[in-house]
Image (cartoon, rainbow, N blue to C red):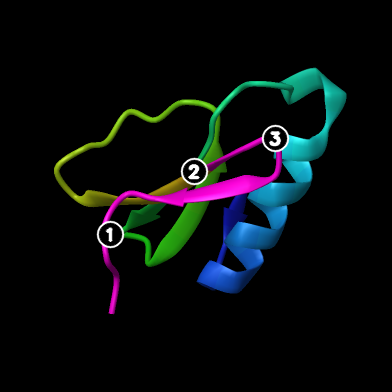
Amino acid sequence: MKAKSIEEAKSLAKAQSLDREYKDESIHIIYCNRTEYFYVDTDGLIRLWEQSYGYYVNGVFTSEKSHS
């Protein structure tokens, strides 16, 4: 899934992490500099032009690092 804002991405990731199908699985939020979109996915692979924002597991957010 893709989102234009971090708030939208966090909402999508949290909802997906609370789904039974994704119980105990990390739902990653990744920002892509090329497209200027946030992506929500179970694959945490980061490419050179992307930045990991954090991830949700069972509705709990964990930040990868401080974002200003």
Query: Vertical placement of 7 versus 33: above or below?
Result: below
Q: Residues within 10 Å of mark 1 (few under 14, many from 20)?
A: few
- Quadrant that contains the C terminus: bottom left
Identify the secondary structure beneath mark 1. loop
Of tags 3 and 1, the one toward the viewer is 3
Which residue sits at x=73%, y=22%? 23
Numbered range of the magenta stretch: 56-68
Q: Where is residue 42? Give x, y as percent.
A: 54, 28
Of residues 66 and 51, the one drawn nearer to the viewer in this rendering: 66
Q: Residues within 10 Å of mark 2 (few under 14, many from 20)?
A: many
Q: Where is residue 51? Give x, y as percent.
A: 27, 52
- Give the image quarter of residue 5: bottom right
Label located before the other in sequence (3 or 1): 1
Q: How far apart are marks 1 and 2 (CA)?
A: 21 Å
Query: Vertical placement of 37 versus 60: above or below?
Result: below
Which residue sits at x=46%, y=26%? 43
Which residue position is annotated with label 3? 58
Amino acid marked by disc 1: Arg
Residue 62 in the figure: left or right of residue 10 = left
In the image, is residue 67 part of the stretch drawn in magenta? yes
Residue 19 in the figure: left or right of residue 26 = right
Q: Are marks 1 and 2 in contact (CB under 8 Å)?
A: no
- Quadrant that contains the N terminus: top right
Amino acid marked by disc 2: Tyr
Q: Where is residue 56? Give x, y as percent.
A: 57, 42
Which residue position is annotated with label 1? 34
Question: Which label is found at residue 55?
Answer: 2
Of residues 30 and 62, the one drawn nearer to the viewer in this rendering: 62
Label located before the other in sequence (1 or 2): 1
Amino acid marked by disc 3: Asn
In the image, is residue 61 part of the stretch drawn in magenta? yes
